[in-house]
Image (spheres, rainbow, N blue to C red):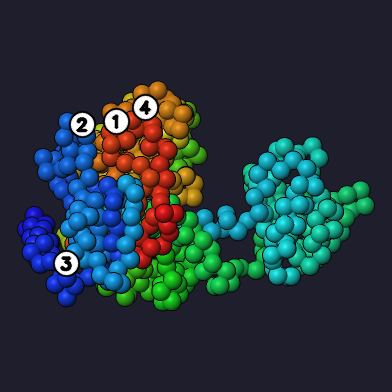
Amino acid sequence: MKEQRFLIHSLAASVLLMASACDTETNKSGPLADLVLTGGKVYSLDWTDPDLDGQPSADAPFNDGTWSPDASAVAIKDGLILGLGSDDEMSAFVGDATQLIDLNGATVVPGFVESHGHYPELGEIAERIDLANVTTMDEMAARVAARIVNTPPGEWVVGAGWDEGAWADELPTKDALDAISPDHPVVLKGRRGFGTLVNQNALDIAGIASDFEAPSGGEIVSDDNGHPTGVFLNRAQTLITEAMPPATLEQKKRIVMTGLMEIAEAGYVSGHHAGVYADYYPAYAELAEENKLPVRVEAMLAARPENLDLMNSWIERGPTRDPAQKFQVRGVKAYYDASLGSRGAKMIEDYSDMPGHSGVSGSEYGFPEDVVMAAIAAGFQVGVHAIGDAGNREVLDFYERAVAVDANSLGLLHRVEHAQIVHPDDFSRFGQLNLVASMEPCHAVEDSPWAEDRVGPDRIKGGYAWRTLRKNGAKLIFNSDLSGTDFDIFYGLHCAVTRSDRNAMPEGGWYIEEAVSIEEAVRAWTSWPAESSQREDLTGTLAPGKFADITVLSIDIFNVGQSDPHRLLDGQALMTVVGGEIVVSQL
Ligand SMILES: [Zn+2]
């Protein structure tokens, strides 16, 4: 690795030497950039990792508590970085056709990677009418009417978020909807999941008239004359969901694009989709084929019984071979236990706040060990969801079995998704098994009000333990697990460095000894996910020859994160460059 770094450096040095030895005129016959960003604070991250306590390395541009950018300009050609250096040095690469952008002091870092997300969910949310906090039927109808204007007749209009609890005394009815939507089926889901309101058009399509019998466990609410009012409760809601057509491929592509554009706007150049099923896979594949993906996508195929056809077809083919392709199918996502909040995560001992209960895991939870083993044998990197200390231990046991079957498994850098509560005896096994701990800093902050109730004061010390995992040799990568948590990178960095919420609570941070330094946090969203995907020769830091995957930020995250981390929340992503293409720019 070291030799390779040196080689890249000496290549870069000779390119720069050549550039400065010649005058600008003569260099016009040499390589000219397509794009040059100047006037920035560039942090290449092309230096040695910090030590296991987070102290920057001797070759890091860090002195007396202050970070210094290691370049001000980046030159880009054919999607790759041609050079980094001062504005003056990079001007050697500027020709008549070069696009020159002055960053006006903005900060430049390697593009952020969202290494665990569910992108179509963002698109689905964006396509639904938002009914949160709607308290009157007039307002509900007005929001539906605004959407209908732009929806072709016959297409389903879907909203979500009205509060069944707040409407419990006087449930909404379809009358106000029928007046505005004769030509569209309308479905408005409640935020708590137990009520759905539909209009007459939807009732007709579902074939539901007076005296239709509801399935057991459900209710079709009706008026005094026995006519349905449009509200379906509990299990009766399936009558509606079953009547809705599945989204078409074109709709799914639009939904995927919406999700990916949202992360591009937030500064991400790449997204790992943790659990791709056969429903959205064709949308990704077609968008990739049409060269329309705005960011790089690493698909982790869902190893679930209902997804075996897609899994098996890829196990037969093996992972994507061309590393330059924007769409990579090189991972598998498996599920070992559920969540801590719902007490579904598998604990070694009972839950502290529910004696007699320790959660479920493994095959009981739908973990198909034989399929995951076959994926490993085919060369896929596996990421297994594990939350409880027993869930984590059993997943470590599984990875140990995989190494016993095939020692090459160690080289695939398998992942543990969440690695939320780990037994003290098990931390060292992460390093021994060459594992990646894929974690969500903001989950720690958001779970902090109740997580200790679930597991008690001792087990919580092995919870959300980023520092301990890193010290034990785990490769740390950070992500949001969107759409459940805000994927704003500044919020994420803030959670990672302060272990406190937007209001700086709890004061001093929650188990602050497990926090990471700003450099570690930035790396856990850039160079470390590149390494964990074995793509560090291509991306993750800014160096000549690597992908021109770049994020431009309004604040100097290194110095703000170092000296005044709560101000990280003031940051904004200004520009996202993927493979030399400016995908988003607010400059
Ligand atoms: Zn997830």
Q: Amino acid at mark 2?
A: Gly
Residue drawn 17% across the image and 58% down it: 89
Decide if residue 429 is on the left or right side of residue 492: left
In three-dimensional space, the C-alpha distance between marks 4 and 3, rounded to whole angstroms, equals 53 Å
Mark 2 or mark 3, which is nearer to you? Answer: 3
- Residue 140 location in percent, x, y? 75, 49
Q: Is residue 204 left or right of residue 159?
A: right
Q: Which residue is mark 2?
A: 65
In the picture of the structure, the residue carrying the numbered disc 3 is: 24
Q: Nearer the viewer, residue 28 or 465?
A: 28
Give the spatial CA distance, label 4 vs label 1: 15 Å
**What is the C-alpha distance between the residues marked 1 and 3?**
41 Å
Q: Residues within 10 Å of mark 3 (few under 14, many from 20)?
A: some
**Distance of label 2 from label 3 (alpha carbons):** 38 Å
Residue 4 percent coordinates (x, y) = 10, 60
Depth check: 326 or 383 in front? 326
* Rendered residue at 50%/39% (across/down): 342
Task: For mark 1, give the secondary structure.
Answer: helix
Identify residue for label 1.
563
Which one is closest to the eye, mark 4 or mark 3? Answer: 3
Toward which corner of the image does residue 240 lie, by quadrant?
bottom right
Q: Quadrant of the C terminus?
A: bottom left
Q: Earlier in the sequence, mark 2 or mark 3?
A: 3
Q: What kind of element bears circle 4?
A: loop
Image height of 443 relative to 9, above or below: above
Badge 1 amino acid: Ser
Q: Is residue 134 visible?
A: yes
Determine whether label 1 and label 2 are within 8 Å by CB: yes
How far across and down, in percent of the image, does residue 50 sit? 18, 41
Circle 4 is placed at which residue position? Answer: 509
Q: Is residue 19 above or below residue 63?
A: below
